[in-house]
Amino acid sequence: MKGLWDAIVIGAGPAGMSAAATLSEGGARTLVVDEQPLPGGQIYRAVERNADNASLSAVLGSDYAAGAALAARMRATAAELRFNTSAWRIDADGTVWTKAHDKIERQQARTLVIASGAMERPVPVPGWTLPGVMTVGALQIMLKDSGLRPCGRLVLAGCGPLLYLFAGQCLEAGVSDLVLLDTAERANLIPALQHLPKAVCGHGPGYLRKGVGLIIALRRHGVNIYRGVSNLRIEGAERAVAVSFRAGRRTLRIDLDLIALHEGVIPSQQIARSIGCAHRWDEEQQCFLPVLDPMRESSIPGIFIAGDSGGIVGAAASAHTGALGALAILKRLDKITDTEFASRKAVTQRALRAHLTIRPFLDRLYRPREEVLVPSDEVIVCRCEGIRAGTIRDVVRQGCLGPNQAKAFLRCGMGPCQGRMCGPTVSAIVARETRQTPDTTGYYRIRPPLKPVSIGELASQYEED
């Protein structure tokens, strides 16, 4: 460990880059840690490298290209940037254990900004573990990282803005054989319309125009879009070859080469839960969110959570939440005056609110179906250990009252993903079977290491000490 940092920022997506730039520009000694080789997170992944690739930039769009300016701003500061670096243990006292190039280091900071972003909501449907089944986010990462596009017949199944955004990017990339299965319930529209007056304020109209434009483009290109899709089943023995589903009163089947699932995104919980930050169930976003104050400080003083890891807000809004947390830290470190803090806080909060006007409308319109949140008995929930939903229900009937007991009974959540893929579903199943609220049921107890670390790597750290 070399000195004490004023702040360590974990994650270099829009929230992390904004936080790091604001902190360093304000005179705070700042360290940024990110697993990727370049800044940008998932939403702006490889944005610097792709800046000179005109054809790929045209496919990914102007919103993606906007991330380059944020990356440039962060690089222009004195913040120390460490990429290809994993934070595998974080303590509430500001200690961060990192791993890079098989070397373990221990860093210490007065404050932490967790900007670990979001993950795609697990979509446990029959056949989702077959080869040939991916997530929309994974396909988009391949497009951003390497310019790879899907071949053959592609089926995109699920709901949410990313589903339509990626479909539009596929068209721009030359994908011709594309089918969309929109699983959003038609009944969601009426309660969503109650939020429309707010959605046409601030930056809401821009988001709405973009969504409508994507749908019009898909229609113009003749893409088949099935709405109100339910009972999704992926068929195949050794790999996915078809998907069957209900659309209205019809049961349909489509042959395919590749299917990508997506039911929105949820905050990445592992880091915040491992530290002990309090969480609450959010009915609108149908997921657990960390308990935060308006400046994004968690229940543990000095621990700030910015961006989608604090609740799904989108890329532009995430950058503003990162700035808010950084301003609070600068104020605590006496790096800015009360007057400057109040002025910059007001401007940032106003900008943030302008981007959030659309969120209640989108959250309600694209609320996932019950069958996604609480799958049927035959569906595998824990992919690592091969545990099915029916098995989880069986142990609940035997007296299991929570996810951690289910882990002890069945080993679900103990595989390589450490419960990331099964945690939301296990909590939902237990809550439903016990007729408890999600807050009462709770979530897995997360312990380090958050990422794999070998005994040899740990030993090398102690040899240095």
Image (spheres, grey):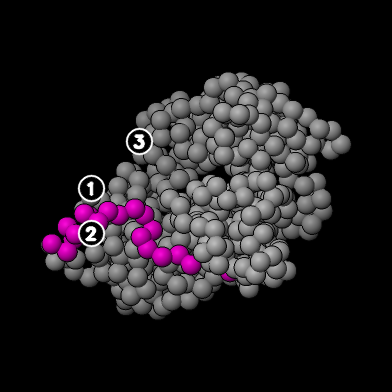
What range of the chain is rendered magenta? 442-463
Q: Which mark is residue 458?
A: 2
Badge 1: how crowded within 10 Å, few (<14), some, or many (20+)?
A: few
* Three-letter amino acid code of the residue under disc 1: His
Inter-mark Cα distance, 1 to 2? 13 Å
* Three-letter amino acid code of the residue under disc 2: Leu
Residue 110 drawn at (x, y percent): 30, 73
Q: Nearer the viewer, mark 1 or mark 3?
A: 1
What residue is shown at x 63% (from left), y 73% (from top)?
440
Q: Quadrant of the N terminus?
A: bottom left
What residue is shown at x 55% (from left), y 62% (from top)?
409
Residue 421 drawn at (x, y percent): 53, 51
What residue is shown at x 25% (from left), y 56% (from top)?
455
Q: Is residue 208 visible?
A: no
Q: Which mark is residue 101?
A: 1
Inter-mark Cα distance, 1 to 3? 22 Å
The kind of secondary structure element at disc 2 is helix
* Mark 1 / mark 2, whichever is N-terminal: 1
Q: Are marks 1 and 3 in contact (CB under 8 Å)?
A: no
Inter-mark Cα distance, 3 to 2? 34 Å
The kind of secondary structure element at disc 1 is loop
Image position of 322 (left or right of 433): left
Please say whether residue 462 is one of the residues in the magenta stretch: yes
- Whether 463 is drawn above or below 142: the answer is below
Q: Is residue 417 visible?
A: yes
* Three-letter amino acid code of the residue under disc 3: Arg
Residue pointed to by mark 3: 49
